[in-house]
Amino acid sequence: MRTVTATAAAVTAALATGVASVAAGRLASDAALKAPPGRPLPTEPRLTVHGTAAGQITLTRHLAALRPGRYGLAGDGSHAVLGPVLDTAEHGADTVVRRLERVTHGTLATGDRAWFTPNLYVGNPGTALDLEYADVEVPGELGPLPAWFLPGARPTWIVAVHGLAATREHALNLIAPLHRRNVPVLALAYRGDVGAPPSPDGLHHFGETEWRDVDAAVRYALDHGARQVVLLGWSTGATMALRTAALSGVRERIAGLVLDSPVLSWETTLRALAAARRTPGALLPLAVRAA
């Protein structure tokens, strides 16, 4: 009887440990699998605004704040567009001065916390770029998918697909130059986005299921006058474009791919996101396993 009791206790402890491990792994994996659209990923640091002046802004010194190029700067209720680091400005030991191109909305006050975003515009093609467009619905596997359509004379359409934690506003960065070249653009909101059907389990799948929404957008384009399409994707949106090109029943009508930072290893990406959330190293394998 003593042996049976000891065995039962050991099994119970093992089960409890297993359940706790899975729960801990699931909690860590949520950094990627439940990333809300339009909010910063845990890999994106929050920077403090140390001050603003005419055409410039001072931020906490960080590798993120030193990135070359133009970026959006988003805060709670604010958005601005930043240019490059100003070499002629006086930088502090703990601060970086960048060009402040414009404040789209809200205000930037000393002490505010903000983060870099690839979105240079907010709103829709009409409010952000003063372009005529149509709100359309793409018939998706889970229900109607909202999309922006900007017409053009060319027979090849661009289907633009944003990445993890972003929104279709990301496509606004390229819509204006494409529009000037008469290229029709369809900017898609897919499952899990605001206004689109949720994923059945409420999780992101790194394109494993989401690619079907891109396939639906390709078919919508072909049904509405496109002879062929080019898929333009960022991050997980680029991965979705790759999967669509490989698996779609109309892949022969996909003329090209434009891929910006595709997620080629979801395990590596998930580990990075979970680690940025200060997940203990011992739990990182569990996060991957739970995902």
Image: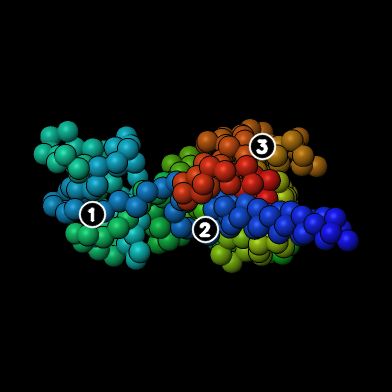
> Which quadrant holds the N terminus?
bottom right
Residue 233 visible within the image: no
Residue 76 visible within the image: yes
Tag 1's secondary structure?
A: strand
The amino acid beneath tag 2 is: Pro
Q: CA distance from mark 3 to mark 2?
A: 21 Å
Q: Nearer the viewer, residue 211 or 13?
A: 13
Expressed as whole percent of the image width and height from the top left, the position of residue 91 reads 14, 39
Q: Circle 3 sits on which residue?
A: 242
In the image, is residue 139 above or below residue 216? Answer: below
Q: Circle 2 sits on which residue?
A: 37
Expressed as whole percent of the image width and height from the top left, the position of residue 44 reads 41, 47
Q: Earlier in the sequence, mark 1 or mark 3?
A: 1
| Quarter holding residue 238 | top right
| Closer mark to the observer between disc 1 and disc 3 | 1
CB under 8 Å between discs 3 and 2: no
Tag 2's secondary structure?
A: loop
Q: Residue at x 53, y 42 (%)?
A: 281
Expressed as whole percent of the image width and height from the top left, the position of residue 183 reads 54, 42
| Closer mark to the observer between disc 3 and disc 2 | 2
Q: Nearer the viewer, residue 34 or 282?
A: 282
| Quarter holding residue 49 | bottom left
CB under 8 Å between discs 2 and 1: no
| Quarter holding residue 13 | bottom right
Q: Which mark is residue 144?
A: none
Q: Residue at x 47, y 51 (%)?
A: 277
Q: Which mark is residue 49?
A: 1
Image position of 77 (left or right of 170) = left
Tag 3's secondary structure?
A: helix
Expressed as whole percent of the image width and height from the top left, the position of residue 45 reads 37, 48
Image position of 247 (left or right of 180) = right
